[in-house]
Structures are given as C-alpha cells and as structure tokens.
C-alpha cells in the first residue's frame, strides 16, 4: 500500500491523500483458498425455525435474493440455545410445541414433531441441524437424527449440543460432575459414536460448536480426538464480537478492529485444517444480550461485509448469521414488519463473492481502509473497497483509491451506503445497494438500480468511497 500525497504550492495545500493499489493479474500469495459457492449463510434459532419459514413473509425472499446472486441457496443452520431445550416427539402433530409467558420470550422447554424435519427438508439449500445433547436423552436425539437423515436430502451436518462451554454441572449431561473441557470432548466423541453408529453414517457431524475459543476449543477437541475423526463433517465456532455491555459500533465495524477480534480463531481454523476438515462459524452475529443498540444499525451491516471477507481469508468456509426470536431480535436481517439494516451488508458481501474462486487482501489491514481483489478462474473480476471510518454527523469525509493494473477501458461499480453508520431502517434511514432498497415486510428489491462508471486511463482509475461506505468495482 502506498500513500500518495498531492500537494499544491505552499499556501494552497488543497489536497488529497489517497490510497493506491495495483490489482495483481493472478491471485497473490496471501489470497484465500477456494471459496465455497455460498459462504454467507443464515442460522435460525431452533424453536423459531418453523415460524420463520411459514409465518414470516420476508424469509423466503430474503434468502432467494442471495440465491439469485450466486445460483446457490444460502446454507442454513437450525439451532441455538433452544436446541438444547428441545425433545423430539414422534407423535406430535405440531412442528414445535411450547408455551411462553410473552411472545418475546424463548421457551425454556419445547418439543418438536416430524413436520419440523419436513419443513427443513423442503428448503432448497444445505442445512445443518442442531440437536440436543445437554438433556442427555441420547435415544431421543438419535431418533430425531435418524428421521433427519432419512427425510432430508439437504442435510449437510448435525450438531450434538450448542455451545457446550456454557453447560454446567447441573445439566443432565454432566451427571452431577463438573463440566470441564475434557468432559465435553469425551462426551462429544461418545455421542458421535452412538449417533453415527445408529445411523450408519459418517462425515455428518458439525463438531465443537463452541462459543469463542476458551476454555473449550477446536484445537483442544482435535487433540483429544487423536487421529482423524471420520464422523466429523466440519468443526464449528460461534462468535459474537460484542455484547450489550461492550457495545461500540465504531470498534465493531473497524477494519483493524475486525482483524484483531478474529485473530484467536486462526488456531481453530488450523486445528480443523490439520484434520482435513473445514472450519465454519456456525453461529455468529454482532452482539449478544440485545446488542446495546448497535446491532440493528447499518454499521453492523458494514461489519458483516468486512468480517465475511476477513474470516474467509483466515480460512473459514462459511458463516451462519444468527436470527433469533421473531419480534425480539436486534441483529436480525428481517422481521415480520421492517427490514434490518444488517441485511444490506450481507447482500453486498454475497454480491462481492458471487461465483468467485478466491479473494485477496490488497491492503495490510493496518488502516481503516480495506481493498480486496476478487478472482474467478485465476483472473481478477471485481475489487471491493471499504472505508471503515465511523460517521455520524457533519460533512462526510471520504477516501480515494486509485487502482492500477486494470485492463478494460471503463469499469462499473455498485455502492453500499446509508445516511450514517448508525442508520436504522426502522428509523427511516434506509441503506441502499446500487441505489436500491429492500421492501419492509417482503424483502423484495425495489427502486432503480444505479451503476457508476469510471474511465480507466493508462490502466488506472480512481474511486471515492465515503466514510462508512463500500464500493464494488466490476473490472
Ligand atoms: C403440546 O403440549 C401440550 C402440553 O404438554 C400437550 O397437551 C399437547 O398435546 C401438545 N400438542 C401436540 C400437538 O403435541
Ligand atoms: C427421552 O426421549 C424419549 C423418547 O425418545 C421419551 O420417551 C423420554 O421421556 C425422554 N426422557 C426424558 C427424561 O425426557
Ligand atoms: C445406538 O444408540 C444406543 C442408545 O444411545 C447406544 O447405546 C448404542 O451403542 C448405539 N449403537 C451403535 C451401533 O452405536
Ligand atoms: C469505541 O471504539 C473506538 C475505536 O476503538 C474508540 O476510539 C472509542 O473510544 C470507543 N468508544 C467508547 C465509548 O468506548
Ligand atoms: C497481501 O499481499 C500484498 C502483496 O501482494 C500486500 O501488499 C498486502 O499488504 C498483504 N495483505 C495482507 C493482509 O497480508
Ligand atoms: C421501512 O419502515 C420504516 C418505518 O418502520 C420506514 O421509516 C422506512 O422508510 C421503511 N423502509 C423502506 C425501504 O420502505
């Protein structure tokens, strides 16, 4: 990365500091590995899954919008805290059955019936199904897993327990003993043996499913397993960078902040790779505990955009952004009524990655300004620029990027923007992607598409990206 300063005469210093990147004609040494067809996925809270699919109109269109970009339905994971409160009831005629004091509560206990699995089977994309381990009803989990295996052509993997690092000695699975990392690792392995043994299946378990990297970790689990575990499909981490008590949007969406936040997961990815298995973020989103106001913002959407790119570069295969209780979910991408600003970031990330093979960072991840080259069949097809400066009022600062090494005479670009980093759809400050928005309630894309074009001269072109904006340049 070079900083270019164009200075006028003394007394007339007008100008511009800009960034300059040469776009490598082939993937550079720090490019990612082969990308999967749909790295941006969705996690749906277990008890809410049937209602998302059947009662929330926006769900199918929001997923379809992403599929329209890539040709592949985004992968789904069904799970979360309530997977470890759920018992399968083969006789139930309801997909889920529970009672709550208020519609904004998640149930403390629930049952699910065979139609839960039928709804999952009807989805067009891959599904990771999260089943219960905490309640220690192994035959019940095996019955549900067997039904899923027989009915779901789209079953990608099964989880046995959600975030076991939060299990305690009073959970049935602990059998009165303290719940340590080694207790969890041996429990995971013995449950995998029993479930996969009964199903006569291998390569089907999404293992680990730990929140964060300590005290339980994929690195620790893979050591405890010893050799390669044929039952494992992938190793799964959960990550929420912030919580209500730490909420800081400027840090969340910061390009350098993201790099340091994800750094501890590098060893988890390597541990998975050492077993020749993919690593995934099977559940992730911006902030836990309601998010302290930052989760519904456009800035959280910008976080998604850059976090996806940086975690793919770390070597993860896919990310599943969690959608929680319908009507009580700050970070949700859509609801029954309004869209969520974060969806715009997910959509833009999917646009950037659609049908790509590799991405490469052009910058050194030490400034607020990101640039990624996106490759297909070994040649650059797009460049993603992201200005992570936080912006909430006044004149909007901007950054200029000069890209060189371009071969066409003119390039086009699509912009992700919103009035402010803090903009929320429900406050009327709609973000836009190439000038378009997603309709509240339906998720249909609406408005006139705006494509910008820039002339290339001597193989170079300059682009301006405002604070808290991103630009996708089509080479
Ligand atoms: C739902 O749960 C209630 C309370 O346990 C039970 O009485 C009812 O039969 C269940 N309904 C179905 C369809 O399983
Ligand atoms: C375990 O599941 C079975 C059905 O698979 C059920 O009959 C039994 O009541 C469950 N046990 C507990 C303790 O919930
Ligand atoms: C099938 O599951 C049962 C009940 O959990 C377990 O005891 C048994 O060992 C399993 N069978 C195989 C072949 O793994
Ligand atoms: C939020 O994070 C930014 C960037 O790290 C920092 O400069 C700022 O002081 C933080 N704000 C608060 C209120 O902690
Ligand atoms: C990636 O490599 C390029 C050189 O090809 C370098 O300029 C850039 O800083 C590197 N970025 C990272 C994050 O490694
Ligand atoms: C969505 O609804 C909110 C009101 O809740 C409104 O302010 C906003 O402009 C609407 N967004 C779109 C894209 O229509």
Image (tube, grey):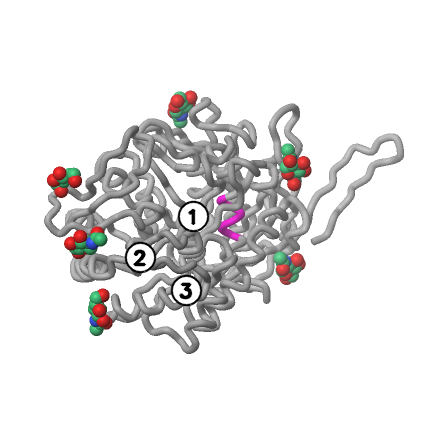
Labels 2, 1: front one: 2
Rendered location of residue 166, percent (x, y): 43, 51
Check disc 3 and report the residue beneath it: 183
CA neighbours of label 1 inside 10 A, class few (<14), some (14 to 19), many (20+): many
Q: Residue extending furthest bottom?
A: 227
Disc sitting over residue 280 in the figure: none
Corner quadrant of residue 52 = top left
Labels 2, 3: front one: 3
Question: Magenta includes 464?
Answer: no
Labels 3, 1: front one: 3
Q: Residue at x 64, y 56 (%)?
A: 22
Corner quadrant of residue 44 = top left
Disc sitting over residue 350 in the figure: 1
Residue nearer the viewer, 322 or 174:
174
Rendered location of residue 8, percent (x, y): 83, 36
Relative to 26, residue 165 above or below = above
Question: Magenta segment, which residues?
Answer: 304-309
State which tag comes first along the sequence, 2 or 3.
2
Give the SS element for disc 1.
helix
Residue 47 in sight here: yes
Q: Residue at x 52, y 30 (%)?
A: 418
CA distance for labels 2 and 1: 33 Å
Rendered location of residue 337, percent (x, y): 33, 27
Residue nearer the viewer, 110 or 179:
179
> Quick one: quadrant of the N terminus?
bottom right
Disc sitting over residue 133 in the figure: 2
């Amino acid at each position: 990365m070079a900083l270019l300063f164009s200075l006028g005469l003394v007394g007339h210093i007008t100008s511009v500091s800009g960034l300059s990147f040469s776009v490598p004609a082939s993937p550079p040494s720090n490019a990612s590995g082969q990308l999967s067809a749909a790295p941006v996925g969705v996690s749906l809270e277990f008890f809410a899954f049937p209602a998302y699919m059947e009662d929330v109109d926006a769900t199918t269109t929001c997923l379809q919008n992403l599929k329209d970009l890539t040709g592949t339905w985004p992968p789904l994971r069904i799970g979360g805290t309530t997977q470890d409160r759920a018992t399968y009831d083969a006789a139930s005629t309801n997909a889920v059955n529970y009672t709550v004091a208020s519609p904004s509560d998640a149930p403390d206990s629930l049952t699910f019936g065979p139609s839960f699995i039928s709804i999952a089977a009807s989805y067009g994309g891959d599904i990771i199904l999260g089943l219960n381990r905490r309640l220690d009803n192994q035959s019940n989990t095996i019955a549900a897993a067997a039904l899923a295996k027989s009915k779901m052509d789209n079953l990608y993997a099964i989880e046995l327990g959600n975030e076991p690092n939060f299990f305690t000695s009073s959970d049935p699975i602990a059998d009165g003993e303290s719940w340590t990392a080694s207790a969890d690792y041996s429990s995971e392995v013995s449950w995998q043996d029993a479930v996969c043994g009964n199903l006569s299946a291998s390569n089907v378990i999404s293992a680990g499913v730990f929140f964060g990297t300590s005290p339980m970790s994929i690195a620790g689990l893979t050591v405890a397993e010893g050799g390669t575990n044929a039952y494992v499909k992938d190793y799964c981490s959960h990550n929420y960078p912030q919580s209500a008590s730490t909420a800081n949007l400027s840090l969340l969406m910061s390009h350098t902040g993201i790099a340091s936040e994800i750094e501890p997961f590098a060893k988890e990815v390597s541990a998975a790779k050492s077993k020749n298995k993919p690593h995934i973020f099977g559940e992730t989103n911006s902030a836990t505990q309601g998010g302290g106001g930052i989760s519904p913002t456009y800035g959280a959407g910008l976080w998604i955009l850059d976090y996806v790119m940086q975690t793919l570069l770390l070597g993860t295969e896919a990310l599943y952004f969690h959608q929680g209780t319908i009507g009580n979910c700050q970070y949700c991408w859509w609801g029954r009524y309004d869209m969520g600003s974060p969806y715009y970031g997910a959509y833009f990330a999917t646009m950037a990655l659609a049908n790509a093979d590799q991405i490469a960072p052009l910058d050194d991840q030490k400034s607020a300004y990101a640039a990624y080259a996106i490759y297909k069949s070994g040649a650059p097809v797009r460049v993603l620029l992201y200005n992570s400066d936080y912006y909430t009022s006044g004149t909007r600062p901007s950054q200029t990027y000069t890209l060189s090494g371009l071969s066409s005479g003119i390039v086009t670009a699509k912009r992700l923007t919103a009035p402010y980093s803090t903009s929320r759809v429900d406050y009327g400050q709609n973000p836009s992607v190439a000038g378009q928005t997603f309709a509240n309630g339906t998720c249909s894309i609406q408005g006139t598409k705006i494509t910008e074009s820039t002339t290339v001269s001597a193989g170079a072109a300059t682009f301006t990206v405002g604070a808290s904006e991103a630009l996708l340049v089509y080479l």
